[in-house]
Image (spheres, rainbow, N blue to C red):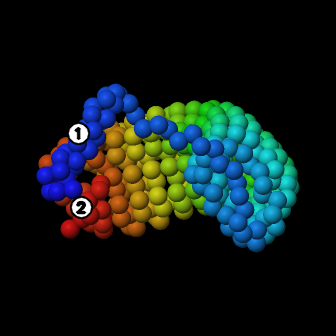
Amino acid sequence: MNQVEGTFEMEKQEYEKSEKAENVPENSEPKEDLTINEITIVDPDTYELDLNHGRIAKLENLEPLTQIERLYLRWNLIKKIENLNTLTTLVELELYDNQITVIENLDALVNLEILDLSFNRIKRIEGLDNLLKLKRLFLTSNKISKIENLTHLQQLEMLELGDNKIRHIENLNGLANLDQLYLGKNKISEINNLDSLISLTCLSLQSNRLTEIKNLTNLKNVTQLYLSENGLTRIENIDNNTSIQTLDLAKNKILLIENVGHLSDLEEFWLNDNEIADWKSIENLKENKKLQTIYLERNPIAADPAYRRKLKLLIPWLVQIDATLCR
């Protein structure tokens, strides 16, 4: 083939490609991969198996895993918890972001310490009767409307129930070792029934329907308290919570800074998006000598041209004001 013929052949191929491209409908999209995969065990002696994002639709073929301790099955298409009876050595099980509707068939997993069933379609907390060694339970972003069937989990240290449909804090008696409780983004209107949680250090009730801070008297070990995005109007009833280091009250309707002078360990104070207009209330932070960071942006006082300078003069030990470090 001479040079002229070769050039013509290349032009012909390019023309055919452009013709095909022009014939593709404007709104067409790449076809979705609808392949469903099965679990295949390559190393039966493995202690950890990662099957995340594998388009797996069914839990099966796991019997060869006689020593497995950690099994990860995030982002799959699993609809039912099943065929796990032989995995008695399992310590951690992740089924995050699947299509599970019922917590079931976990009775044999007596050594399980971490269970993650977040981002599924679960409506009820159940099926955990034999998991007496469970320490961390994640049930975020499901359809759970009631806290129940947990009081026997006496080793539980972390409970994550954020982004559900829970209206009441209840049935947490017996969880004396619970260290972290996350109930953000629910429909809770009142803080109560927490007295038995004497080991709690972190309590999150963000994005609920609270109008009053109360019933925290027994939570003397709490170091992190998150109450942002509620309907709170006052800082109150935290007299016994002297261990607080981080206090999040952002996006409420609070008018004054008050009742925090006794929080000698307070380091982080988030009060942005409230209604604080009185500079005199800032003086109530003069006793908080460990305070390093304060957020007050989008409060009326933040409109003052000398806002940062005034804060620094009143609280000279501040390290950060809003998102900016102090000079």
Q: Amino acid at mark 1?
A: Tyr
Quarter in which the N terminus is drawn: bottom left
Which mark, residue 142? none
Residue depicted at x 39% and y 51%: 270
- Residue to which mark 2 is pinned: 312
Say whether marks 2 and 1 touch (CB < 8 Å). Answer: no
Residue 278, how many percent across, how many down?
28, 43
> Looking at the image, is mark 2 or mark 1 earlier in the sequence?
1
Which mark, residue 15? 1
Quarter-wise, where is residue 35 in the image? top right
Quarter-wise, where is residue 94 in the image? bottom right
How many numbered dots are placed on residues in this image? 2
Quarter-wise, where is residue 16 in the image? top left
Secondary structure of the residue carrying tag 1 is helix
Secondary structure of the residue carrying tag 2 is helix
Residue 71, how many percent across, how many down?
69, 60
Question: From where the camera sits, is residue 198 visible?
Answer: no
